[in-house]
Image (spheres, rainbow, N blue to C red):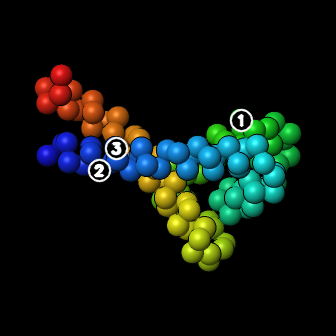
Amino acid sequence: MIMIPAAFFGGYALIWSIPGVFFGAVLSLGEPARIVWLDKQLARDVNKLHSDYQNMLSYSIMSRFMNYCIAYPLIRHRATTSSTKFKLFMWANSLGFWSWLAVIVLGGLAKALGIIA
């Protein structure tokens, strides 16, 4: 019973990883307007976030994007856009990050139970 969801999440995580890395690189190394728009949609306090120069460096942008993706199921009510494209993008990325977490947890559980060596 553990291996079926692990295979599903593992398959999605692997398939998602290539475009996920590409979109992350485009976001963190590209136009700052993209992360500013995401911040306006999902951040709690945009003005405080953009008042510090450190928050606009590429590693900070990527870290913030990862946090938005992981927390998206809980913070999606903050979004002011009704764009279906945005919602699908965020759900796909959220599922990708959560799939990696699920694979790690399910793999550890299978190892602990002796299902895998």
Q: Are marks 3 and 2 in contact (CB under 8 Å)?
A: yes
Residue extending farthest to the top is 117
Q: Is residue 72 left or right of residue 14?
A: right
Seen at 38% across and 50% down, the residue is 12
**Residue that badge 3 annotates:** 10
Q: CA distance from mark 3 to mark 2?
A: 5 Å
* Residue type, label 2: Phe
Label at residue 59: 1
Q: Is residue 35 left or right of residue 16?
A: right
Q: Are marks 3 and 1 in contact (CB under 8 Å)?
A: no
Seen at 23% across and 32% down, the residue is 109
The C terminus - image quarter: top left
First along the sequence among labels 3 and 1: 3
Q: Is residue 103 left or right of residue 65?
A: left
At mark 1, the secondary structure is helix
Q: CA distance from mark 3 to mark 1?
A: 26 Å
**Residue that badge 2 annotates:** 8
* Residue type, label 3: Gly
At mark 3, the secondary structure is helix
Seen at 59% across and 71% down, the residue is 85
Q: Nearer the viewer, mark 1 or mark 2?
A: 2
Q: CA distance from mark 1 to mark 2?
A: 30 Å
First along the sequence among labels 1 and 2: 2
Q: Is residue 107 left or right of residue 69?
A: left
Seen at 68% across and 43% down, the residue is 25
Indicate the quadrant where residue 108 lies: top left
* Residue type, label 1: Tyr
